[in-house]
Amino acid sequence: MDERRALVLGLASVLLWSTVATAFKITLQQLTPLQMVTVASAVSSAVLLIICGVTGKLAQVSRQFYAAPLYYLCMGLINPLAYYLILFKAYALLPASQAQAINYSWAITLTVMAALFLGQRITKKDWIAAFISYFGVVIIATQGQLLHLHVTSLTGVGLALLSTLLWAGYWILNTKKTADPIVSVLLGFLIALPICIILCLYSDTSWSGVTWTGWAAVSYVGLFEMGITFVLWLTALKNTKNTAKISNLIFISPFISLILLATIIGETIHISTLFGLIMIVGGLLVQQTKRKNKKTTDTSI
């Protein structure tokens, strides 16, 4: 184990993920959500293929797929296809600060879905965490106008919440397999890419207005939201004995993201968004406390 390397890789992952909300908004100025998913999937596929080739995992790609083709087809339809189409549409309808904060509640959604589909028990702390986080979502969605229930875009908020269901569902399905995670993600992109291309052709999507800025931004999304950063994060977790220490770094990401959105694209960050995000993160921290206590109890037995 190399704790210093794990920390560096973990911080690098968090910093890169902190930039993607800004990249989403820049890209959406020129590309549709479908175009974004298509190009980003192509970039991610290429990068992950190279990584698998360098690490000697290329032979596993076909082997894993033929072992469970329907499973990987389902996974590819969820992520990246449905998940990112819905997430990018939410970003198109909402300020990025709101969309990314609501999407960040996916970990709470995961707890509820794990209870429904995996039979895991929801504790009192889980319910408290869910209440805190989803109250934060309501604050963000209404921009603090709780009595009037004024929502910037009801469709946008609904899509952002739907993205949390898809992402949580994706990871629940992942628990059924012990296959290499990088190869599994690559298979998802390889399955989604031709479907995206067909959808683009069917929808008669125009690419003529996309400038080099748009191409650069969407390539950045493919590299650092979907591709390289995922590998860096997995490597960080693999190189540490203290998974919780590295995992907790992710709590920094949404706050850095707000700063970047304000400074780079000049988005107004409402105090209600910041307060709601603090509540979402607070709910997640309540869950983390539960897990740490459980680990302590398990160790003492």
Image (cartoon, rainbow, N blue to C red):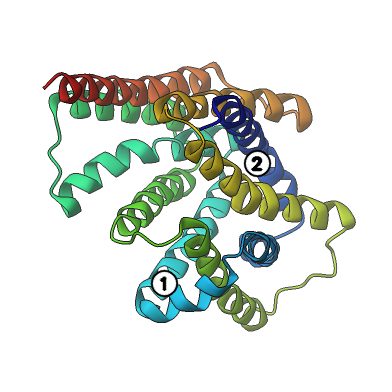
On residue 20, the disc is 2
Q: Position of residue 150 (x, y in %)?
A: 43, 31
Q: Amino acid at mark 1?
A: Tyr
Q: Is the residue marked by circle 2 packed among few (<14), some (14-19), or many (20+) residues within 10 Å?
A: many
Q: Position of residue 44 (x, y in %)?
A: 65, 60
Q: Position of residue 214 (x, y in %)?
A: 80, 54
| Residue 144 or residue 54, whichever sits in front | 54
Disc 1 target residue: 72
Q: CA distance from mark 2 to mark 1?
A: 26 Å
Q: Secondary structure at mark 2?
A: helix
Q: Position of residue 36 (x, y in %)?
A: 66, 60
| Residue 209 or residue 253, whichever sits in front | 253
Residue at 67% x, 82% y is: 201
Q: In the figure, 76 relative to 87: above or below?
A: below
Q: In the figure, 274 relative to 204: above or below?
A: above
Residue projecting furthest to the front: 1
Q: Quadrant of the C terminus?
A: top left
Corner quadrant of residue 269: top right
